[in-house]
Image: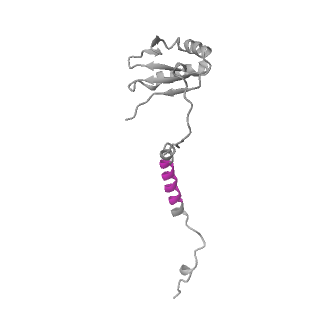
Amino acid sequence: MRHRYRDFGTLSELNITPLLDLAFVLLIIFMITAPLLGNKADLVIPTSTADRESLPPDRVHVITLTQDGELSINGETATMQSLPAQLTVLRNEQSDLAVVIEADHRITVQPVVAVMDALAEAGITKVALITQPE
């Protein structure tokens, strides 16, 4: 009777199937979690004790956007089409002016972006948004 000693020999081939399964599982996990991690940023805004130069009130202009879609500059009614020309006139009168955008919280963001585009077209770079604390 012959004994089979060959069955107890060393295995010269490595089975990589479990390693491939692990690699594919990790790949799927990273593919699912990567987009979720990219959109999150926890920011702590630095503080400063330096005095800020404030502009005189006559150099600060207010653009108001109401929920009804009405637009006004310093209380005077304006249209989105005439806004760049009116802002250019203001900038030509006062080169160092600032504009504050006061928009109703119920409007979409597109009118605000249109106003900011008009400000950029007129060459006005000092822009702020009025907000209120919750």
**Residue 29 painted magenta:** yes
Q: Residue at x 49, y 56 (%)?
A: 25
Looking at the rendering, in which quadrant would you find the C terminus?
Answer: top left
Q: Residue at the bottom extreme?
A: 1
Task: Tell me the residue at 38%/17% (across/down).
Answer: 68
Q: Nearer the viewer, residue 53 or 118?
A: 53
Picture coordinates of residue 43, whole percent (x, y): 50, 44
In the depicted view, which residue is nearer to us: 45 or 37? 45
How many marks are shown on the rendered structure?
0
Predominant SS of the magenta segment:
helix
Query: Which image quadrant for residue 105?
Result: top left
Q: How is the image coloured?
A: one colour
Name the spot of residue 11 as percent of width and height, x first. Answer: 58, 74
Q: Nearer the viewer, residue 133 or 8?
A: 133
Q: What span is colored magenta in the figure?
A: 20-33
Q: Identify which residue is drawn at 56% across, 39% down.
A: 50
Q: Is residue 82 magenta?
A: no
- Provide residue 5's location: percent of width, then percent of height: 55, 83
Q: Position of residue 35 (x, y in %)?
A: 50, 44
Residue shown at 53% from the left, 83% from the top? 4
Eyeballing the image, is 126 above or below 50? above
Task: Work out whether residue 91 or residue 83 is closer to the camera in this orientation and state it.
Answer: 91
